[in-house]
Structures are given as structure tokens and as C-alpha cells.
Image: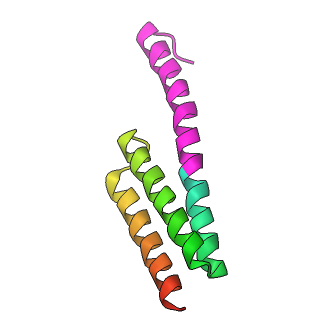
Amino acid sequence: MANHPSSEKRNRQRLKRTVRNRGVRTEFRNLVKETRASVRTGDAKAAASSLATAVKALDKAVTQGVLHRKTASRHVSRLARAVHRASAKK
């Protein structure tokens, strides 16, 4: 554990940020999993609606500083491509 007052404060801040970021990260990961599950089942309508919520959550994570913008962009691109392919099969 840190002994210097400023490093003790940084540790307290780190713990608060970790808890806050964990919730955001869990949310978008669950939404991405939900979208991928919809794609696997072949339900194009559900996949498209869950894609929209997943994209919103990823963009929000970028805004909050949890994800890098290019990482989120890569996730969105891959999800959109999967949803598009699933809807094109029908």
C-alpha cells in the first residue's frame, strides 16, 4: 500500500474508477453477446435491434473513457458485418 498522501489518493481514485468502468464494460459486453446470439439464431430483426443498442453502449463507453475509439469502432464494424450477413442469408 502507498504511504505518500498523493499516492493514497490516487489509489482511492483508481478503486472508484475501476468499479465504475466495470459496470460500463459489463453492459456493452453483454449487449455484444446478445447481438451475436441473435445472429447465430438467424433472427435478423432481433439482431438489428440489438445491434443498435450495442452500438449505443459502445459509443457511450468511448465517451466515458472506458474503451479506445478505434477498439469500439472495430467491435461495431464486426458486429454490423455479422448482422448484415445474417439478414442477407434470408
Q: Does residue 4 show up magenta in the picture?
A: yes
Part of the protein shown in magenta: 1-27
Q: Does residue 23 show up magenta in the picture?
A: yes
61, above or below 20, in the image: below
Residue at (45%, 80%) from the top-left corner?
84
Q: Residue furthest top?
A: 5
Residue at (50%, 29%) from the top-left corner?
17
Image quadrant where residue 41 sits = bottom right
Find residue 54 and report its horizontal and vertical position in percent.
50, 58
Instruction: State the predominant SS element of the stretch in magenta.
Output: helix
Q: Residue furthest left?
A: 70
- From the viewer's perspective, is 81 left or right of 42? left
Residue at (57%, 57%) from the top-left corner?
31
- From the viewer's perspective, is 15 left or right of 80? right
Find residue 55 and report its horizontal and vertical position in percent.
44, 58
Colour style of the rendered protein structure: rainbow
Q: Residue furthest front?
A: 45
59, above or below 50, in the image: above
Q: Quadrant of the N terminus?
A: top right
Q: Quadrant of the C terminus?
A: bottom right
Find residue 20 and report its horizontal and vertical position in percent.
54, 33
Residue at (49%, 78%) from the top-left corner?
82
Find residue 40 and report its horizontal and vertical position in percent.
63, 79
67, above or below 23, in the image: below
Name the one closer to the observer, 18 or 52. 52
